[in-house]
Amino acid sequence: MLGHKRRHQLNSHLKGVVIHAMDDKKIDLNLLLALEALLAELNVTRAAKRLNLSQPALSAQLSRLRGVFGDELLIPTSRGVLPTAMALELQVPLRKTLDQMRELVSNARSFDPSTASVTLTISASDYMQIAILMPFLLKMHLVAPNVRVMVRQLQDSQMVRTELERGLIDIAFLQSEGLEGTDLRRKAVLFERYIGIARKGSIEERPMPIDRFIQSRHIIVSPRAEGFKGSTDEALAAVGLARKVAFAVSSFMFMIEAVSQCDLLAVAPQRLAERYSDRIDMFAPPVPVAGFGIDMVWHDRTHNHPARIWLRTQLEEFCAEH
């Protein structure tokens, strides 16, 4: 058996060879694979076949290996080759080194959510966070207990590109018309409808008469304080009508909370409104209101990363189910 000091020396030597292997001007990493095959077969012809190389090519690699290690490594005999004392000492650390490298490559190409420890970041509006991400993350936690997810509030869709490029976020959820014409990768994941909402027990007539709808005070969401009009106002204007918008707020949570406590009306995304059906009544808007699509957006820099691929796949499937 090798002494601890000798094992340490050999491991250090192999680490040095691997470091040099990263610079193809000095040594080809395939030399270590050639040495592994030669020590396993103790026959140049069989080792060459195992590596899918010609015998002269493998002989050339053996010559380079002898220069790297300063040892003959394999002595020709009438029955093949015999390993030198150094070659025998190298077998175990060589196998461990190559096994670690194979494991490194394997881990880089695969992702096991049950054991992986990784942090991922998603940017989304409060609507998307409550309607989709909250139930998704609660489900995901059961199958990926060590995967941490940072959910960031989507402030400005125009900043998303920079955040994705810099790696500050891995995925963003935007309305489908956001960031048009960019080279970001995107996937349509859901379409959302609008539905009218009112305080629980306050709706006496269904469908709601349009007169009551336009005469009531309304609250709308305007994330960037763009004014007191939205998709509903466009739909009303198309038939020559207008409603009374009393408040424009930046959060759907604010809007729903306000509606549940007073006589304000609002038009909200259906998936979100349904989560608060114990506190609000829902009704069909008296005029058709155009819905909106949501795209999942990411950058090329994370396109082929196994953990990010897994997260995008899971999110896409979850959105399709819901």
Image (cartoon, rainbow, N blue to C red):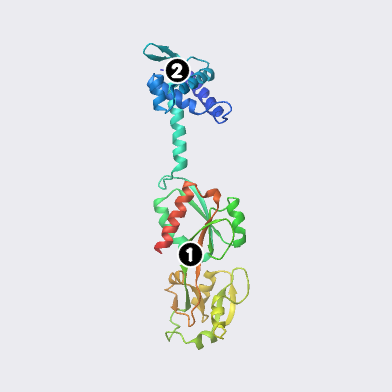
Residue density around tag 2, few if under 14, some if 14–19, many if 20 or more, within 10 Å? some
Which quadrant of the figure contains the N terminus? top left
Does the rendering let one see residue 93? no
Closer to the N terminus: mark 2 or mark 1?
A: 2
> SS class of the residue under badge 2?
helix
Q: Which residue is mark 2?
A: 87
Mark 2: amino acid: Ala
- Which image quadrant is residue 103 in? top left
Q: How many marks?
A: 2
Looking at the image, which residue sits at the far bottom? 211
Q: Quadrant of residue 242?
A: bottom right
**What x and y, as percent, mark residue 158?**
62, 61
Q: Which residue is mark 1?
A: 130
**Residue 206, percent from left and from top:** 42, 85
- Residue 22 in the image: above or below residue 170: above
Image point 47% across, 67% down: which residue?
Answer: 191
Closer to the camera in the image, 173 or 183: 183
- Which mark is nearer the camera, 2 or 1? 2
Picture layout, residue 81 above or below residue 236 = above
**SS at mark 1?**
helix
Quadrant position of residue 112 = top left
x 54%, y 82%: residue: 236
Q: Calculate the distance from the C-alpha at mark 2 to the C-alpha at mark 1.
A: 62 Å
Which percent across, then down, holds residue 321? Answer: 39, 62
Instruction: Using the image as rendered, state which of residue 109 and residue 216 is in the foreground.
Output: 109
Residue in the picture at 47% in, 72% down: 193
Instruction: Name the quadrant of the C terminus.
Output: bottom left
Q: Give the residue type that dot 1 points to.
A: Ile
Q: Position of residue 265 (x, y in %)?
A: 51, 80
Residue at figure coordinates x 60%, y 54% from the top left = 163
